[in-house]
Amino acid sequence: MIRILNFTLIVITGLISLGVYRVAEQARMTAIELRETKTVIAKENQSMTVLGAEWARLTQPARIQALSERYLSLNDHPAAQRASITQLPPKFATPPENAIRNASAVISQRTPVVPNLHAGT
Amino acid sequence: MRTSREAANLLRGRIAIAALISAIGFSVIAARLVDVMVLGSTAHRESSVVPALKRADIVDRNGALIARDLPVADLYATPAVFWDPAGAARQLAGVTGADEERLKGAFAPKKGYILVQRGLTPEQRDAVMQLGLPGLDFLDGHKRFYPSGRTVAHAVGQVDSDDNGVSGLELGLENRLRTQPDPVQLSLDIRVQYVLEHEAAEAMRSFHAKAAGGIVMNVHTGEIWALASLPDYEPNLRTLQPGDSTRNRMTQDVYELGSIFKIFAFTEAVEEKTISLDEPIQVTSPYRLGHYLIHDFERLGPVLPAAMVFADSSNIGTAQIELRSGPDKQKPFLRKLGLLSPLKTEEPEMASPLYPRHWETVEAATIAYGHGISVNPLTFAAAAAAVVNGGTLIHPTLLKHPEAQHGERVVSEEGSQTMRQLLRLVVTNGTGTKADVPGYDVGGKTGTAEKAENGSYAHHLLISSFCGVFPIDDPQFLVFLMLDEPHGNKESGGFATGGETAAPAVGRIIDRIAPLLGVARRDTYVAANP
């Protein structure tokens, strides 16, 4: 009986040892894979760092402007040609008299040429 | 003979010992598993495969990259192990850009430890590895890279070969850049910066000026959206090219700025209620003050309304108006605006204002029109912003800070409103008409100062400037531009004054940047018919 028990325990110990060895080996292999993956990630991050800087260099306004002047027939549009959708009149509104006028006319209406000359006293 | 009881006790003891050893073994394994899987003690060792960067990125207010540490390597060689030193020199020179003759000379003795090239990029490093040469060592390091090059050179500054900040924000924000893991976000907008730099360079070229500089600042938040100084330099080269300058004229230099200082004389007069803007002022030239004669740039008189004294930039009229308050009130007022003390910003190189020790009547009169006091343009811009933003002091900043500053009140709401009307008058009817931009309601003030040379003022050496704010009914931004020693051209009618040189440039800048700043045009159906 004792011998059977001893033998059984030895077999169990052996099996457990094998199991531990297998787990340890798997862990070792996984650690190697993890290290390699981390190295790859670090290198990719480094590449992204370099590429990000390169992208910033390629998209800097001075370069875009130079390329635009060289290859595109685009010009700076004066402020008078700019508007946004929110600045359009309501759909059915009747435009008041002289609604469309040049900017300087509007400016002279909105800001008196001679300001409030009594403000200082 | 052992009895069966003794044998059983012995076996029990052995089993206990085996169990104890197994338990200890499993405990060790379990502890290690926890260490590896939960605590991750090996992670730090493994993450050091690629060296961590030393300084944080610098980005503009929209996240565009301004400065970044890039991984580079220094390459060293041990020539003693080369079979063919001359061939190795040729190959290494080919892929690293090093001087082949220098390498040949250094490798020839076949001894020592030779620096081949500094700052190799990862691609160059791979190319060197492909050569398969023995006796090569790489020393990992970093190199600060500025994608925008010259465009933001003065504001951002640069680092030395050890990656320590030596100028500009690289020095001013040294601790933050060393410790903060996230990028440092500036108030600068790289697009606005480019426009400012481009127009300043165009004006400098067009008027053959010695130097130029400009500032775009939000008058409520104090954020500097752009800061340019020309000549500039290429920060990636680490050396200066002919004509380059590392001097930031907007912060490091002080100037007698001339008539744009009249903004403060009139603000003081409006606050002190010493003038009525429609009262007639005698501007007969010259105006005698003790032993001194004060002149105007052109004959304006004999009489002008006080408002037109400002709009036409009369020195004579401004001096008389200032003397109603006198030096006892002028000096504290300028001090309150921050014009008599060094400005504190993230930029470490900030020049202190220069002003007379004895501040009497004559000094008060000349300071009123911007002579006799020297400040750097950024200090001037901060004070001018306080005048137009409703009257509260702001502290200029180069860090993104989109919330309005509510600083000390230095000018009343009414006084600020009156000054905005006067500044608009300069652009509609005065010396600054060339700065007008339809739809953006620009207000501003011109300045043309004579530079001091050999103890007196030289009529041909000018500092011409324009300070514009827009939209004038509710100013959001201030645009300042200065030209050092401009010369008149055909376009300016031969004049080199601020109104003919800097004002049109400011107008062009506002025209280009207003959409980027989110300032809508005012001359629309909706705006005209609220």
Image: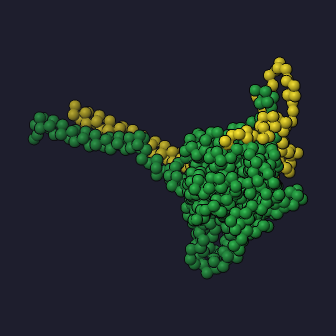
Which residue is more in the foreground, B15 or B257?
A: B257
Q: Residue furthest bottom?
A: B109
Q: Colour of chain A?
A: yellow
Identify the image's colour scheme: rainbow, by chain, secondary structure or one colour.
by chain
- Relative to residue B120, is residue A120 depicted above or below? above
> Could you tell me which residue is drawn at 45 percent across and 43 percent down?
A27
Q: Colour of chain B?
A: green
- Place of residue A95 in the rendered image (x, y in percent of width and height, measured from the top left): 85, 23
Quick check: can you spot residue B126? no
- The quadrant in which the C terminus of chain B is found is top right
> Could you tell me which residue is drawn at 20 percent across and 41 percent down?
B14
Q: Residue furthest top?
A: A92
- Place of residue A9 in the rendered image (x, y in percent of width and height, measured from the top left): 28, 36
- Place of residue B205 in the rendered image (x, y in percent of width and height, measured from the top left): 81, 60
**How many marks on residues?**
0
Which of the 4 quarters of the picture holds residue A81? Answer: top right
Which residue is more in the foreground, B64 or B409?
A: B409
- Place of residue B465 in the rendered image (x, y in percent of width and height, measured from the top left): 74, 56
Quick check: can you spot residue B412? yes
> Could you tell me which residue is drawn at 77 percent across and 62 percent down?
B286
> Could you tell me which residue is drawn at 83 percent across and 57 percent down?
B299
- Relative to residue B426, is residue B341 depicted above or below? below
- Relative to residue B363, is residue B410 depicted above or below? above
| Residue B18 located left or right of residue B209 | left
Which residue is more in the foreground, B491 or B358?
A: B358
| Residue B396 located left or right of residue B279 | left
| Residue A35 located left or right of residue A22 | right
- Relative to residue B46, is residue B295 depicted above or below? below
Which residue is more in the foreground, A71 or B228?
A: B228
- The quadrant in which the N terminus of chain B is found is top left
